[in-house]
Image: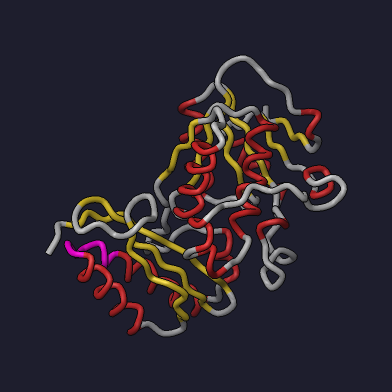
């Protein structure tokens, strides 16, 4: 039976391996895949549901971010989560937002960090707190938020946190759209336009050179309608400069209507 916990003091360490999946709620099949991966690798599964104000900018969608706790609890129970930790903002940040925060460094200032200043400081601060509170041995993050995954791994390494960070491949709709809680904001026409992102990434991933990947992806994005590109970038798997050959990552962010979407795919470059 899944237990709902809303207070930090009620979280208890239990014998065995503990996995934690951190979410902001509005759960979908992408979150279910994270839970299934976590359940397969641990004795106990904790799911956290917390819409973190620290990672939202002043003009972002904190107030309208979907909050569907009852449905989320049903989904967590179906995936056999042992505990759902769903604290209030006051419970997580008593006395107001924290003065001491985990800074993301230079990697947090590019791509999503450039478009959303301070976002990753908010993410890493709450992730660090939740890792401490849940006493997790292993945590699972989706690869759709690839920069977030890279930064959590870097934080764990740099701060010597005793937790294993694992990535889970992006879950997609049958038509290729990456699953996201923000997809529900899209109108029918906007959802069709949003498919431009996954089509562009697929076209890029079919190429064998860095120049070819970027050119093919840009061609699809330039031909699309209703999409305002924020960035398209090719990097190595650690978000450094793109290699001439070997594993790489193609990332995109764009606005469709009022909704900002991100996506990425792996690719293997063969060189000129």
Q: Point out the stretch of residues depicted in magenta.
A: 202-209
- Residue lying at the far right of the rendered structure: 95
Q: Please state which of residues 3 and 163 is positioned toward the viewer in this rendering.
A: 163
Q: Nearer the viewer, residue 75 or 204?
A: 204
Q: Residue at x 46, y 83 (%)?
A: 226
**x and y, in percent, of residue 237 in the image:** 34, 50
| Image quarter in which the N terminus is found | top right
Location of residue 74 with respect to 43 vertically, above or below = below
Question: Could you tell me residue 213's position as x and y percent?
Answer: 24, 68
Residue 146: % across, % down: 44, 53
Is residue 272 depicted above or below 168 in this figure? below
Q: Decide whether residue 182 is among the magenta residues.
A: no
Residue drawn at point x = 58 percent, y = 65 percent: 184
Identify which residue is drawn at 61% across, 51% down.
103
Q: Which quadrant of the figure has residue 166? A: top left
**In which quadrant of the rendered image does the C terminus lie?**
bottom left
Q: Is 192 rendered above or below residue 39?
A: below
């Amino acid at each position: 039976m899944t237990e709902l916990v809303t207070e930090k003091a009620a979280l208890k360490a239990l014998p065995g391996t503990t996995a934690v999946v951190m979410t902001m709620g509005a759960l979908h099949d992408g979150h279910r895949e994270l839970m299934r991966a976590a359940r397969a690798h641990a004795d106990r599964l904790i799911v956290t549901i917390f819409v973190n104000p620290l990672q939202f900018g002043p003009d972002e969608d904190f107030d309208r971010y979907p909050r569907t706790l009852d449905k989320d609890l049903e989904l967590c129970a179906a995936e056999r989560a042992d505990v759902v930790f769903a604290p209030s903002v006051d419970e997580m940040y008593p006395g107001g937002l924290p003065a001491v925060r985990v800074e993301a460094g230079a990697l947090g200032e590019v791509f999503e960090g450039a478009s959303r200043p301070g976002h990753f400081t908010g993410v890493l601060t709450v992730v660090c707190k939740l890792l401490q509170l849940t006493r997790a041995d292993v945590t699972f993050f989706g690869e759709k938020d690839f920069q977030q995954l890279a930064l959590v791994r870097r934080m764990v390494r740099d701060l010597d946190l005793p937790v294993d960070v694992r990535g889970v491949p992006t879950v997609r709709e049958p038509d290729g759209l990456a699953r996201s809680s923000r997809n529900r904001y899209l109108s029918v026409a906007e959802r069709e336009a949003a498919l431009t992102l996954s089509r562009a990434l697929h076209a890029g991933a079919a190429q064998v050179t860095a120049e070819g990947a970027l050119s093919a992806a840009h061609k699809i994005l330039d031909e699309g309608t209703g999409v305002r590109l924020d960035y398209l970038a090719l990097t190595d798997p650690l978000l450094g400069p793109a290699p001439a050959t070997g594993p790489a990552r193609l990332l995109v962010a764009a606005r469709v209507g009022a909704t900002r979407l991100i996506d990425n795919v792996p690719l293997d470059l063969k060189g000129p």
